[in-house]
Amino acid sequence: AAEYNKNYPDKQVRSFCNIAICYRNLGQLDKSIKQLNEILKSGKQTEKTLAIVYGELASNYMQKFENQKAINSLLKAIDVLKEMKDDSEVYPVKQKLANIYMLQGNYEFAIDLYDDCIAGFKKNGDNKNLSYTYLNKAESLIQLNKLDEAKENLNLSIKWLKEYQDIAVLGVAYSKIGHIEAREGNEAEALASYEYAMENLSASNSPYIIRVGLEYINHLNRNKKYKKSLVVIDQVKESEAYKSINLEDKMYFLQAMADTYKFTGSYKKATDNYTETI
């Protein structure tokens, strides 16, 4: 496609971007970055495709945990997009930038950016991105212990997630509601929210079922609901995501399983799992 579009530079740039995205999906991040930098050197981009290239570079750097390089790329994309009359493209980039600041623990600044994105997505009728922004803003608010405000943003997110039937992200949103309810001592509400979260994550084969399941199991164990913990353990272990669980998540999950087996008298299983975490 890239060769076919050589007489249409804008389309050719997009084709080369798609090649870079394929490299990233294959885990070949350096190859993807090289491809994107070659596009920049070619000078064939329009303002819009130039911003896309910077955005894709940022995605690669984020996966390499090179956050400052990701931030620099996103700021370049934002500068390009600000020159365009149509500002609809700038808000998804700002959203990505806010996500990095949140991951770095710069929650106040992330929230300011999320608020800017919320106003932009509302103006442009982009309710799908609006739902994701409310969700991420809620996570920042949880980290700042602003639980009531976090819950308000989660409920706004859930409203749109239900409309779009995005059950995977809906599961994540309800897990955060469960987390807040648990911290506020509302046990029945916490259990109902976690259960609904797990149902949605299981139905969508979401990889988030592992971390949410882990949080749910630990909550159940703290409240001595060990039989239910065993059910959730099986639910996670039977998921597609568990087949490719990363080492860090596996260590924490084995620890939670071992605790559950110890509390239910399955000492041999507990010992085996504790040993595997070492």
Image: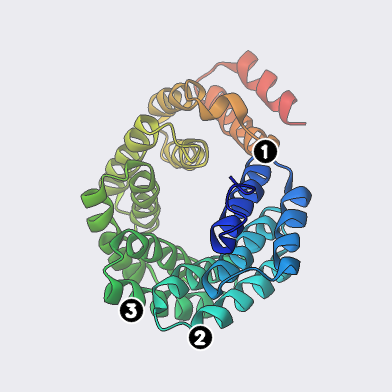
Percent across and percent down for residue 262 are: 57, 24
Specify the amino acid type for callout 3: Ala
Instruction: Please name whichever residue, 255 or 61, is drawn nearer the observer in this view of the structure.
Output: 61
Disc 2 residue type (three-letter): Glu
> From the viewer's perspective, is the residue at label 3 or at label 1 nearer?
1
Sequence-wise, the earlier of marks 3 and 1 is 1
**Left or right: 139 in relation to 266:** left
Q: Is 129 situated above or below 98?
A: above
Callout 1: SS = loop
The answer to whether residue 186 is visible is yes
Could you tell me which quadrant the C terminus lies in?
A: top right
Q: Secondary structure at mark 2?
A: loop
What is the CA distance from the residue labelled 2 to the residue labelled 3? 19 Å
Answer above or below: position of 184 versus 227. below
The residue tagged with tag 3: helix, strand or loop? helix
Front residue of this view, candidates 169 and 52: 52
Residue hosting label 1: 26
Q: Nearer the viewer, mark 1 or mark 2?
A: 2
Give the alpha-carbon distance from disc 1 to disc 2, as whole Å: 34 Å
Q: Determine which residue is flagged by label 3.
A: 119
